[in-house]
C-alpha cells in the first residue's frame, strides 16, 4: 500500500527565501490544492489502481451534461481540472469526497513538478538555438539572423532533429529533484527551490520524487 503523494496546483510566482545558513535562495510558490478525490480506480473495476483528484470548483452549468451527471452520481462538486495519480491499494485507503491538502508534502524532501512551458510562438534559429548569425557588415545584406541552408548532403532529405526555426515552447516539461523549502498548510502554499515550467496561474502537477 502506498500513500497518495501527488497534488494539482497553480503556479503563484517566484520570490526568495533564506536557508539555514543565511544564503538567499530563489523559490517558486505553488498553491497546491486543496484537491478533492472525485474517483477511486481499482483493479476489479478499472484494471489499475489510482486516485482521481479535482482542482478548482466550478459551477454546474459550465460543464457538459454527461460530465455534470457523472459528478452528481459521485456526490461531489464539479471541478475544472481532473488528474489521476497512481496509488497502490487506493480502494482500501481512499474514498470519494476526501480532501487532500499541501500537508502531504510537509515531510517530503524533494518533489518533481510537471507543467506546460511558456509558448514563444514561431522563433528563429538565433532565439531558439543560440545561433551566432551572420556578420553585421562586410557586404552582409538582410541575412543577419537567417539560418544556414538545410540542403541535403547524401540522403536528399532533412534529418530529424535538425536545429532550425520553428515553434518554441508550449511543451510538457518536468523538473525533477526540486527541494521543498517550506510548506504553509494554512494557505496550501509550497515553496520549492528553483524555477518550474509555465507562467503565473498555470496548472502544474506535484508528485514525490522517487
Image: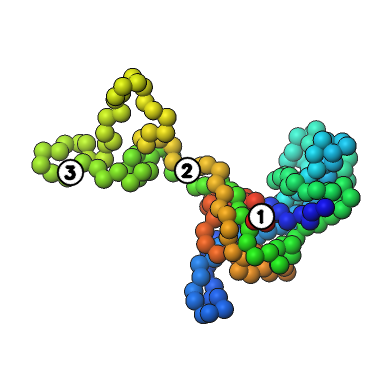
- Dot 2: element: strand
Whether residue 78 is visible here, answered yes or no, is no
Q: Name which of mark 3 and mark 2 comes first in the sequence.
A: 3
Q: Name which of mark 2 and mark 1 comes first in the sequence.
A: 2
Residue 104 percent location from the top left of the image: 74, 62
Of labels 2 and 1, the one closer to you? 1
- Dot 1: element: loop
Residue denoted by label 2: 169
Viewer-proximal residue among 143 and 89: 89
Residue denoted by label 3: 135
Task: Relative to 24, say whether 49 is above or below.
Answer: above
Residue 113 percent location from the top left of the image: 60, 53
Residue 200 percent location from the top left of the image: 55, 55
- The quarter of the picture where residue 66 lies is top right
- Dot 3: element: loop
- The quarter of the picture where residue 73 lies is top right
Which residue occupies 85% across, 41% down? Answer: 42
Point out the image quarter for the C terminus: bottom right
Which residue occupies 26% across, 45% down? Answer: 132
Q: Residue 77 vs residue 25: left or right? A: right
Give the crowd class for mark 2: few <14, some 14-19, many >=20 residues within 10 Å.
some
Give the crowd class for mark 1: few <14, some 14-19, many >=20 residues within 10 Å.
few
Residue denoted by label 1: 210
CA–CA distance between discs 3 and 2? 28 Å
CA–CA distance between discs 2 and 1? 27 Å
Amino acid at each position: 500500500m502506498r500513500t497518495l503523494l501527488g497534488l494539482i496546483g497553480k503556479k503563484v510566482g517566484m520570490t526568495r527565501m533564506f536557508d539555514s545558513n543565511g544564503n538567499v535562495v530563489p523559490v517558486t510558490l505553488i498553491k497546491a490544492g486543496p484537491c478533492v478525490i472525485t474517483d477511486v480506480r481499482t483493479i476489479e473495476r478499472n484494471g489499475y489502481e489510482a486516485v482521481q483528484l479535482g482542482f478548482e470548483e466550478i459551477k454546474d452549468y459550465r460543464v457538459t451534461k454527461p460530465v455534470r451527471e457523472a459528478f452528481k452520481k459521485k456526490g461531489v462538486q464539479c471541478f475544472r481540472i481532473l488528474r489521476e495519480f497512481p496509488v497502490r491499494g487506493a480502494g482500501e485507503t481512499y474514498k470519494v469526497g476526501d480532501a487532500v491538502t499541501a500537508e502531504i508534502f510537509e515531510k517530503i524532501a524533494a518533489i518533481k513538478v510537471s507543467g506546460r512551458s511558456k509558448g514563444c510562438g514561431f522563433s528563429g534559429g538565433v532565439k531558439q538555438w543560440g545561433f551566432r548569425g551572420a556578420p553585421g557588415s562586410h557586404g552582409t545584406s538582410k541575412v543577419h539572423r537567417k539560418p544556414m541552408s538545410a540542403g541535403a548532403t547524401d540522403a536528399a532529405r532533412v534529418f530529424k532533429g535538425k536545429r532550425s526555426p520553428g515553434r518554441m515552447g508550449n511543451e510538457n516539461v518536468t523538473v525533477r529533484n526540486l527541494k521543498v523549502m517550506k510548506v504553509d498548510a494554512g494557505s496550501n502554499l509550497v515553496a520549492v527551490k528553483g524555477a518550474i515550467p509555465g507562467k503565473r496561474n498555470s496548472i502544474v502537477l506535484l508528485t514525490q520524487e522517487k
